[in-house]
Amino acid sequence: MKASFSQSLFIINPNDKAFVRLAKYKIANLWRILNAIIRRLNPSNFKEQEAFSVFEELNKSYGADEKKEKAPIKHKPRILLLGPYHFKQPMWSVRANAAMPDLIKPLANFAEVHLATPIPNSTIAPSLNKLVIEEGIYHHLLPPRFNLMSIEEKNYVLDALVEQIDPFVAMNTFGVITSGFDAVTCARRNNVHSVLRVPGNELEAHKKMTQQTNAQVDNLLRRKEFYARKVQMAVNHADKVMVMSESEEKRIIEARQRRDGVFIQIRGADTAVFKPKEKYGENRNKILNVGFVGRLTLEKGTDILQEVMCKLSPNADIMFHIASPENFEDRFKKSITNLIWHGYVPHDDMPSLMEQLDVLILPSHMEGRSQTMMEAMAAGLPVLLQAKVHPEGLPGMIHCDETPASFIQALNELSSNHEKLAALSDNARQSALNYFDKSHWSEQMTKIFKQLLKES
């Protein structure tokens, strides 16, 4: 294959001078913008993949069945983290800036961590840049159009990266369809131990978020088999699969048709930062403050949320709070009078927002393990959620069914029963301390990956 700029690799490490890193970021940004324009003019890059059958194209990514021999570890063990590929301001900024340190720091305690991503700009991911400087993480800047490449081109780039790094474990940071599939297949080709991180059911999320116009449905069906095959291959061939919840663990075990290699690992909540504020004394505000935090997409249950707010508006005893980066304020406020719109709230400001709330509503139709839920419970907020999505039913969780009426009934009960609300608040905090504390899960992750390195 001919070498091209899109196949070149830039490595940013702690020894690079600042002006070198800045130059690499700026060059990559220019190419990213150019390719975004090209994609807008010619959006159907999927046709390139349709030249092959689904099976043939995907199976090519595995390469030969014979695996390369690996030499024993003679250096500090190296771990390759792949992704994220997409970065949309500002919600992705919230997710990545909060998630990346929690994912990387436990590994950096005993291994040399290499993060490969096409995201070039340190202003979009300041936590990533901070990790590079403070933790000695190596940041490999993939070509800006990496997520638009054909599978063959991606294989070329990733195999070159693996040859350069020589890792013993490869894992994705976010999505299964994108970086998860690439991490597992790249590891298989190069005889590297693979860990597939499964945050949630992406295929169901895709279906849920697709508006039901004929063109979009056709487009979804056209991609569905390709996406499903990528997910199934990644799940089947990963050496280990990291899931976020018991419900996801059950789903993945069924998909793999075997129990071995599946384990639960979450980021957890910082219970020293997210903690209850005294709200239930004699001077407590009589208004029930109900919060929703996150993307306003169908996947997150906005169909339920909107009907609940409309049915309970106006209501002098209930005030809704929405924290979301999406610009839907005018649309919501047209029909809902008892609403405070907070807009985009950086993760560092979330504890202050939680202090203004009494309860969190999380009507998502699908979740892996909601970070907002864990942080809200650490802050002493009971959480309303669908029972089928969070079947574990920890104290402080209020199970509802998938109808708005169920959520409305629960909110009315809490609004009229402050003693019950106070008890649920205590329960939520205790559940967070017992099950979601970040320090415990950080230790657990270190232990699991040390064992993986012994097995490699």
Image: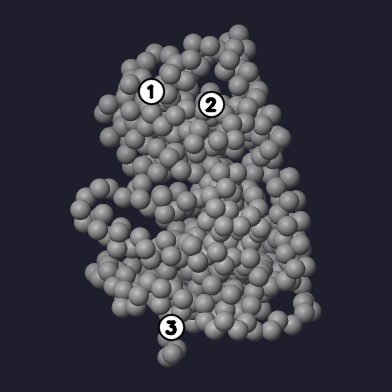
Quarter of the image where one finds residue 44: bottom left
Disc 1 to disc 2, how far (Cα)? 14 Å
User: Which mark, residue 5?
Assistant: 3
Q: Which residue is mark 2?
A: 398
Instruction: Identify whether 66 is placed above or below 241.
Output: below
Badge 1 crowding class, 10 Å Cα cut-off, few under 14, some 14 to 19, many 20 or more, is some
Q: Position of residue 159 (x, y in %)?
A: 55, 80
Q: Is residue 161 visible?
A: no
Give the quadrant of the N terminus: bottom left
In front here: 54 or 438? Answer: 54
Q: Position of residue 82 (x, y in %)?
A: 55, 66
Q: Nearer the viewer, mark 3 or mark 1?
A: 1
417 lies left or right of 130? left
- Give the residue furthest to the top: 282
Instruction: Identify whether 116 is placed above or below 429.
Output: below
Instruction: Identify whether 454 is placed above or below 302.
Output: below
